[in-house]
Image (cartoon, rainbow, N blue to C red):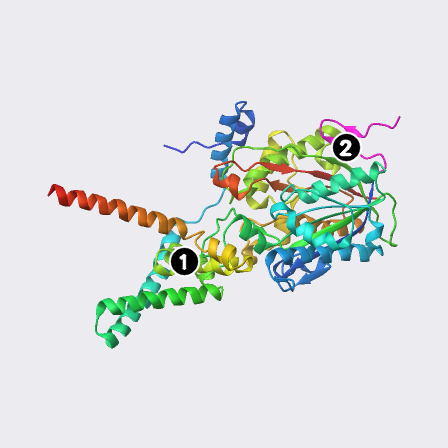
Amino acid sequence: MAKNKYIGKQSIEFGNPPYIISEASIVGKKEGEGPLGPLFDQIIEDPMVGKENWEEAESELMKLTAQKVLSKAGLKNTDIRYLIGGDLLGQLIATSFGIAELNIPVFGVYGACSTMGEAMTIGAILVDGGFADRVMAITSSHFAGAEKQFRFPLDYGNQRPFSASWTVTGSGAVIIAAKSESKKPGEKEIVITGVTSGKIVDYGIKDSMNMGAAMAPAAFETIKQNFEDFNIQPDYYDKIITGDLGYVGRNILLELLKEKDYDISDRHMDCGLEIFDMNTQDTHAGGSGCGCSAVTLTAYIIKQLKQGIWNRVLFVPTGALLSQVSFNEGNTVPGIAHAVMVEAK
Amino acid sequence: MEKEKHRISDVLRERDTERRNESYNEYVKQVTPVFSTAANCVKAFVIGGLICVVGQGLTSFYLDRVQDLETAKAYTTVSLVFLSILLTGLGIYQKLAKFGGAGTLVPITGFANSVAAPAVEYKKEGQVFGIGCKVFTIAGPVILYGMFSSWVLGLIYYIIQIIR
C-alpha cells in the first residue's frame, strides 16, 4: 500500500514532488512601472487589452498568459491534462471566457486572492497522485474589473483609506509536471515539496477596506500550522512569502507569530509590498488580487529560486472572502491562506 | 487618562470568540494608519471653496447678461453639472476628489459625478440593464432619502401651520 502523504493536521508532503516546468506572467502598465517591472514576461499598456470591457480584458490577459506559459515550455494545449484556474469576478467569468479556447479540462477554483495557492495545491496533488502528467495553474485579476465589482465605478470621486490595497492587473501561470522536462544549464529545477491548506479564519473584521487586517490571522494560522505539521522552524525557509497582506496586515502577522515564539521578520516578504512602490505609485497598503501573488511568484520568486539565490520558500497567498452582498448585509470579512512549499533542486 | 493599549497577546489568549474579535478589532484600529482629519478639512475647504468661487463667477457672468438672479442661478447650476460630467468623463474629477475629498462631494458637482461615473462604467452592459438600471447606484440613496426627508419636513411644516 502506498505511503500516506498527509502529514500533521492540514498538510501534505508529496511523495514525488511535482516540478514547476514553466511559468509566465503578464501585467498591466502600472505593474510594469513598479519595482518588478523588468521581470515580467510581457507588459500590456492598454488597460482594455484590445477588448471592449474590463471583464473581457481580464479574460484576454489570462488567455495570453496561458499561451505564454505553454510556449515557454515548448508545449501545446493538448499536452496539459487539467487546468486549474480562478479569478475575482463573479462566477469566475474571467477564467471561463479566458481559457475556453484552450480546450483543456478545467477546474475553476475560488479563494479570492489566495486562489493561486489553491490552484497550485490541487495541481500538485493531481500530479503527485498520478492523476495527471502536466497541469496548469493560472489566476488573474484586473484593477478596473475588481473596483467595479467590489467598490465603485472608476470615475466616481471617492477617497481610499491608507489601509486599502490596489488590485493588480495581471495574470500568472505555472505548469506543474511529474517529470523535470526543460532543465536549462545553470538553472536549478523547481519542485513543490508540500502544502498546508488553509481554514477559513474570521477574527471579526468588518472593514472591507482593511483586508490586510482581515487576512493576517488566516496567514498566521496557516504558517503556524505549516511549522507544526512539518515540525520545522522559520529558518527552514529562506523566505516566507505572503500574498497581499500589505503594510497593515504584514505587521499584524509578524506580531501574531511572535506571540507563538516564531520570529519571521527577517525572512518575511509580501507580494503586495514587492509589486508596487508605495511611495511613488500611490497604492496605499500595497497590491492585491489573484494576480498579485501569481505574477510575483512567476516573475520574481521562481527566478530567485532558479538562480539559487533562495533555496526554499513558503509561498502563502492570502484571500479575503467577502462579496458585496455579504458586506452590505453586515457580515465580517473572513480570511484564508494556502501555503505551498517551493524548493530549488 | 492614558488610553488603554490593546495587545495582540490578549487577542490570542481570549478564548471567547466574540470577545477575541472585539479585542482584535480594537488592536487593528490602533495599528491602522488613518488620514489626518485636520489636513483633510483644509483640503476640502480649498477645493470646495474653489468650486464655489467658480460657481459665483458663473453667476456673476450670467447675471450681467440676463439681469435676473434666479435665471442666472439656474444657468450656473447647469454649467457646474456640465463641467463636472465633462471632467468625470475625462477621468479628472476622480483625481480632484482624491485630493479634495468632501470638497468635491458636497457641491452639486459631486452629485453630477456620482451619476455620470456609473453611466460611464455600466455603458458596456447596455442602455437598459447597464446605464438604465445602474445609473443611480450611488446617487439613488441621496434622491430617495432626500425626497423622503423633504416630505417629512413638509408634513411637520403643515402641522405647525395648523396648530398656529
The residue carrying pointer 1 sits among few (fewer than 14), some (14 to 19) or many (20 or more) residues within 10 Å by Cα, namely: many
Say which of B7 and B22 sits in front. B22
Badge 2 element: strand
Quarter of the picture holding the N terminus of chain A: top right
* A340 part of magenta stretch: no
Residue indicated by mark 1: B100
Could you say which quadrant of the image residue B73 lies in? bottom left
Q: Amino acid at mark 2?
A: Ile
- Where are the magenta residues, as a range? A1-16
Q: CA distance from mark 2 to mark 1?
A: 52 Å
Vertical position of residue A45 compared to residue A279: above or below: below
Vertical position of residue A264 compared to residue A246: above or below: above
Residue at the image position 55 percent from the left and 54 percent from the top: A283
Say which of A289 and B10 sits in front. A289
Say which of A259 and B72 sits in front. B72
Q: Position of residue B81 (x, y in %)?
A: 37, 64
Q: Position of residue B42 (x, y in %)?
A: 36, 56
Specify whether B156 is left or right of A67: left
User: In which chain is the residue bearing label 1?
Assistant: B
* A6 part of magenta stretch: yes
